[in-house]
Amino acid sequence: MSDPYRDLSRQAMAEIHLFAARRLLQLPERAPLSRVASEAGALRALMRRVALLGGPGTVAELSLQADFCARVLREPGRVRAAYVREWWRALREFLRVMAGSEAEGRIAAIEERLVPRRTRDWDEAERVAGGHLESARRPSQLLFAEDLLAIVERAREGKEGEHAQRDGAMVSLFCWSSLRTGEILALRWEDIQWEEAPDDSPFTAWSRCRRRGAERWLPVHRRAADALALLHAVWKRTTDRKPEGRVFRSLHRPYWPLSDREIYVILNEALSRAALQASRRDLLAAYAYYLKTTHGYTVLDLREILGFGEPKHVRFLLRTHDAWELNRKADALEKRVQP
């Protein structure tokens, strides 16, 4: 087995170990061990790349050579863009911990030499470090509540009876709840709690799931809750007993639960019939934007509703819609100032 650190000098290894130790002891907020380990790994990967290109042997020397450092970050060969962004984040943290007052000056010198690169979508910043773009990822699609209604309607199109009710309820959860694909796949009737809500409340049901090792109850919009209630009534009438177990099952004996592949096929068929190509993130962004604009929920409210860990995840989810709103305002202002 080859030594993964064979390309690193002893000085570079000692430097990275010292950085990790200082980072762990940094006050007032100590960085988590996992984050420090990730940053140290990114620095080791960066220095191995520098060694292949014939660069300096330590991170400190590398940061003093802004031209060479910027070339490594903008011309990484076949290295993925995500990896290079990790290198740049780790290098910035290294400089802030190890270089003291000189850190911001070195960071600014490197950033000035980072050339604009092609990005994934129209609303993303141009000045980024990174390698070639992952071609498998689709650009973000700008969807709204009308699109969600159309997708759910297309899921029932051409189907009858229980088939239409099951597929409509499943796609409704994709469009009108924050449940992830795996959570929809594993959803059980015992995990759904119905409630009487006032007319102005958008939520009439709650779904139980586990996130970050803890049990969470996430609200389900009344459009999806009504579809689930109808499916519940159909199953109860068909089997003559209270439904239990997996919600989404095959309609043929022995009524096995649907697989993840079957769920994706149903969702993709509905998207195709609506002439859309969207990811789960695009549907969730449209749902969050609807809650924000129609019901006035704030970022902190949406963090709880969507089950996210931090508010920044909500802002990242809504960035395409925020950019669209800014473009609309800019267009309106341009029309006003034109003679």
Image (cartoon, rainbow, N blue to C red):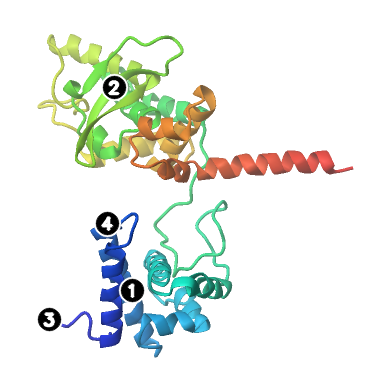
The single residue placed furthest to the bottom in the displayed view is 54
How many numbered discs sit on the rendered protein? 4
Q: Quadrant of the N terminus?
A: bottom left
Tag 1 secondary structure: helix
Under mark 2, the amino acid is Trp
Q: Are marks 3 and 2 in contact (CB under 8 Å)?
A: no
Under mark 1, the amino acid is Leu
Q: Position of residue 223 (x, y in %)?
A: 39, 20
Sequence-wise first label, 4 or 3 = 3
Q: Which mark is residue 1?
A: 3
Q: Is label 4 or label 3 in front?
A: 4
Q: Taking the image as drawn, is residue 7 in sight?
A: no
Q: Is label 1 or label 3 in front?
A: 1
Residue position for label 2: 206
Q: Which mark is residue 32?
A: 4
Under mark 3, the amino acid is Met
Sequence-wise first label, 3 or 2 = 3
